[in-house]
């Protein structure tokens, strides 16, 4: 039986990172809330990058409805805890890895413990988990924890990063005390103002904010993991320029397009205000239908 050796397991990273940087990644701790479509991919990608300390959270269990996009969803894992399955998969990559599991998910009572001592937070909560997402990013800003979110959109991904001392999640998205529909509209507009994914949505009624559902692809989740892990590398190693909010980036593989956006004021920007107003009208029309 082959014995695990960290240096040998991640030797092929060397070249894109130095040996000392690889050891630095080994000592970093990353928090990931949500082990579904994007969260599971984030965990495994960062584990293969050589990060060796994680806190992960999810209260849900794998089901058939997860099969199209969630890396841990298989016939052998149906009915099993997402967090436990993903921790097991990460430990199978690196038996020396430390994974702290918050099996009840994150809430107001344990959020500070979840983020404490972490070098980075990677947002992987369900799109519609508005309240806990708002609380998590607010606490990241308070505690000085860098935070990034990668959204799977169509067959592409959009990435936004929030750095300590910079523009906050709330300043950018301006959710405040709005209702869930308004938050959903503001989230989509803020995440991907370039809207590269919109032209090829062939079944528009598949997107229904009122019923908390939308279409997804595994390709988008994989792209999210690659883009978010690259942001993580730059943040954790303090190497390379991090274009944090109000800068954003969206790549759409289906259309072969990349867009970098700069929106001073976030959703208070005139362009965003216009798109939000259009989104409200579209939601109202769909609701009438």
Image (cartoon, rainbow, N blue to C red):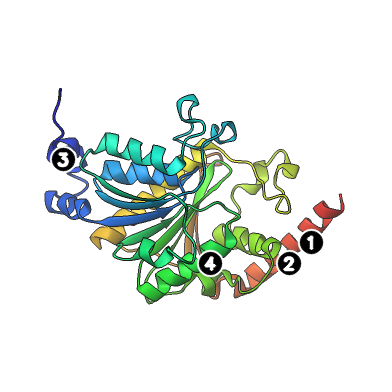
- Residue behind mark 1: 281
Q: Answer with mark 2 or mark 3, whichever residue precedes in sequence.
A: 3
Q: Position of residue 101 (x, y in %)?
A: 37, 49
| Residue found at the very far top of the displayed protein | 1
Closer-to-camera residue (274/215): 215
- The quadrant in which the N terminus is found is top left
- Residue behind mark 2: 277
Count neighbours of disc 2 (C-alpha within 10 A) and say few if under 14, some if 14 to 19, many if 20 or more.
few
Q: Is residue 17 above or below residue 78?
A: below
Count neighbours of disc 4 (C-alpha within 10 A) and say few if under 14, some if 14 to 19, many if 20 or more.
some
SS for callout 2: helix
Describe residue 102's horizontal placement relative to residue 14 as left or right: right
Image quadrant assignment for residue 223 = top left
Measure the alpha-carbon separation of dots 1 and 3.
54 Å
Measure the alpha-carbon separation of dots 2 and 3.
52 Å
Describe residue 203's horizontal placement relative to residue 55 as left or right: right
Q: Could you tell me if the residues under marks 4 and 2 are in contact, i.e. CB atoms within 8 Å?
A: no
Tally of numbered tags: 4
- Residue behind mark 3: 6
Measure the alpha-carbon separation of dots 4 and 2.
22 Å
Q: Answer with mark 4 or mark 2, whichever residue precedes in sequence.
A: 4
- Residue behind mark 4: 134
Closer-to-camera residue (61/186): 61
Q: Could you tell me if the residues under marks 3 and 4 are in contact, i.e. CB atoms within 8 Å?
A: no
Measure the alpha-carbon separation of dots 1 and 2.
6 Å
Q: Is residue 154 above or below residue 100?
A: above
Q: Position of residue 47 (x, y in %)?
A: 29, 44
């Amino acid at each position: 039986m082959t014995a695990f050796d960290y240096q040998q397991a991640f030797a092929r990273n060397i070249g894109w990172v130095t040996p000392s940087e690889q050891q630095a990644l080994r000592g970093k701790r990353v928090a990931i809330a949500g082990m579904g479509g994007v969260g599971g991919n984030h965990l495994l990608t960062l584990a293969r990058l050589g990060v060796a300390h994680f806190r992960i959270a999810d209260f849900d269990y794998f089901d058939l409805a997860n099969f199209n996009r969630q890396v841990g969803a298989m016939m052998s894992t149906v009915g099993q805890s997402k967090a436990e399955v993903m921790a097991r998969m990460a430990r199978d990559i690196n038996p020396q890895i430390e994974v702290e599991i918050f099996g009840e998910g994150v809430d107001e009572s344990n959020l500070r413990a979840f983020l404490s001592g972490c070098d980075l937070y990677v947002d992987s909560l369900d799109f519609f988990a508005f309240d806990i997402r708002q609380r998590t990013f607010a606490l990241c800003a308070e505690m000085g924890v860098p935070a990034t979110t990668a959204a799977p959109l169509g067959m592409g991904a959009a990435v936004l990063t929030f750095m300590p001392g910079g523009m906050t999640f709330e300043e950018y998205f301006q959710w405040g005390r709005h209702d869930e529909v308004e938050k959903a509209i503001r989230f989509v507009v803020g995440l991907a103002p370039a809207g590269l994914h919109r032209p090829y949505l062939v079944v528009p009624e598949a997107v229904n904010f009122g019923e908390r559902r939308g279409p997804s692809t595994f390709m988008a989740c994989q792209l999210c993991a690659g883009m978010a892990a690259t942001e993580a590398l730059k943040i954790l190693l303090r190497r390379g320029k991090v274009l944090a909010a109000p800068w954003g980036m969206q790549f759409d593989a289906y259309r072969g397009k990349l867009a970098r956006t700069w929106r001073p004021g976030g959703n208070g920007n005139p362009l965003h205000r216009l798109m939000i107003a259009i989104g409200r009208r579209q939601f109202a029309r769909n609701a009438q239908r």
